[in-house]
Amino acid sequence: MRGWIVGALFVLAAHAAAAEARLPAGAEAKARLARAADEFWRREQDENLDVARIVGRPPRHLPIVSAGRCAADARTARRRLAELGRIDPAALDAGDRVTFEMLRWDAGQRIERARFCWLQPLLTPYSTPLNSAQSLLAGHPLDRRADLESYRRLLGEMARFVAAIEAFTRGQAARGIVLPRDELPAVLALLDAYAAEPDRSPLRVADARLARVDADDARAFQAEVARLIRTRVNPRVRALRDYVAGAYRAQAPAAAGLYQYPQGEAYYRHLVRFHTTLDLTPEAVHARGVDAVAEIEAQMREVRRQAGFAGSEAEFRALLRTDPRLRAATPADVEARLARPVAEVSAVIGRYFPRLPKAPYGLRRLDASLEGAQAFGYYDPPSAHDPKGYYNYNASHLDQRSMLQARAIALHELLPGHHLQLSLQMENASIPEFRRLGLPTAFVEGWGTYASWLGVEMGVYADPYDRYGQLALDLFMAVRLVVDTGMNHYRWPRERAAAYMREHLTLSDAEIGAETLRYAADMPGQALAYRIGYEALLRLRRDAERRAGAAFDLAAFHGCVLGQGAMPLVVLERHLRSCLAGDDARPARTAP
């Protein structure tokens, strides 16, 4: 940065500090907090491609992954903590206290995560920054010449972006951190997709996206995109692919799980705290999972009895695997089975929530390149590029894919799950932008799991088989607690984890294979958030019901849970007590 810019910023900061000194205590605290939040969010938009895509503000440059960047991120987080330490949270109103606590929690997590920089995966299908860059470019506006130039610049940086991923991957391998052998076929398939010729490349631009551009500019742009893909991007991706297929694969361990890497056990303990947003240990999570599996299976036995099935659990599972009613014939059939329960929820949802989102929702099939690596699918929230929220469902291997859980998945992903929660959050202009777009896993996925369960009260599972499907999905979340901790902490072989899943679930071998790799190699700890978040929300609801008695208002409770957007569960618990007591409406304390 040039000296005159630094000098100007110093003068502005001095003026801001002098102005704050003249403010009342509450206003000063609010101003300091707003500055900390703004600085944090500016950096996120510059360095987090997923954030840049959602806000519709492409960065000037693609961020380069490196150990130096991890260290810089930790230094920034320490400065943020120091700034927050000069703020009196008692002088803030309820909404600002949430902002304060979220910024402080995030900074602490970043400082801790920087210790484990080399352990973060860059090549796995769920976690690779290649997908983030591709999604950013897929949503890049292309309406003006300036847009075309921005796209060309970012695409031109993809070669350097990929080279940095390769350099980091080599650095990991030098430290004994190499993905499990069983994960590499999915990695190589992913890289093959990114190395495709320009007309099939994930980075290509469909002509329809250039409808508002002058025809000559559009032709020149498409020629330049094809040239960049062919001559710059693809050679770098192929070089990375050759390294992974050769020297890297020769080092790949047969075992899966973080425990086998340097600092791997400590990193997993960090991930448990990060993803659950609670101070939990792997041992405690594992025990919760074992208990939850037993509890849910007892409920499933009762549902089988209600359905009039007199055989054993194994016989019922065999029936579920072969029952043609639980198989979709076509992708369109999959979509229809997901759409029906959401329509039923829509008819009654106003009784359960004080506010509903404006954003529409939809269903669409998962990209074919991802169907082999993702067992189910994912929800894609509204963005500046597309105001509609979508559940991207997996419609591959329909002869092996049971639709038993279709209703529960639809509620989890759309209404009253992710679409309702995330759209309300993104539409909430009363909270800072970083909170409108923040996605703490335990809250978001815990809410999705709670939403599936809420369908019981909404009457969506009137058929015992549908209720069994909801319990089966709940059981799936509980099994994850056992298997994720089993492989990463208790050193379970992947075969033992797969056997445990086959014992308790009706997933196909293909689904189990994808899931076990997700837990052990791709996103360790992330799958814990679903059940742990759900348990926390249900506990908070039961506590509120006990305190309010007959006066308990479920819609008001949901309004308090969702009204300030997603947040770490440790923050939610404090916020919820304040909101339900009516403290949110009270002004902040005015200090002398």
Image: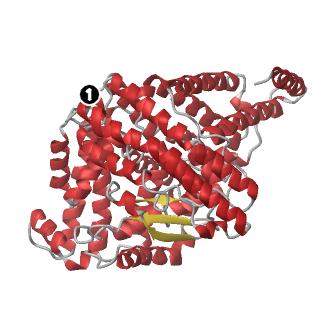
In which quadrant will I find the N terminus? Answer: top right
Q: Name the residue rendered at 42%, 27% in the picture.
A: 118
Quadrant of the rendered image containing residue 388: bottom right
Above or below, comparing residue 246 to residue 538 in the picture: above
In which quadrant will I find the C terminus? Answer: top right
Q: Amino acid at mark 1?
A: Gln
Residue 418 coordinates in the image, percent (x, y): 50, 59
Residue 524 coordinates in the image, percent (x, y): 35, 39
Residue 211 coordinates in the image, percent (x, y): 68, 70
Residue 257 coordinates in the image, percent (x, y): 27, 35
Above or below, comparing residue 203 to residue 128 in the picture: below
Crowding at label 1, few (<14), some or many (≥20) Cα neighbours within 10 Å? Answer: some
Quadrant of the rendered image containing residue 382: bottom right
Q: Circle 1 sits on which residue?
A: 260
Q: Name the residue rendered at 60%, 68% in the picture.
A: 207
Q: Nearer the viewer, residue 573 or 357?
A: 357
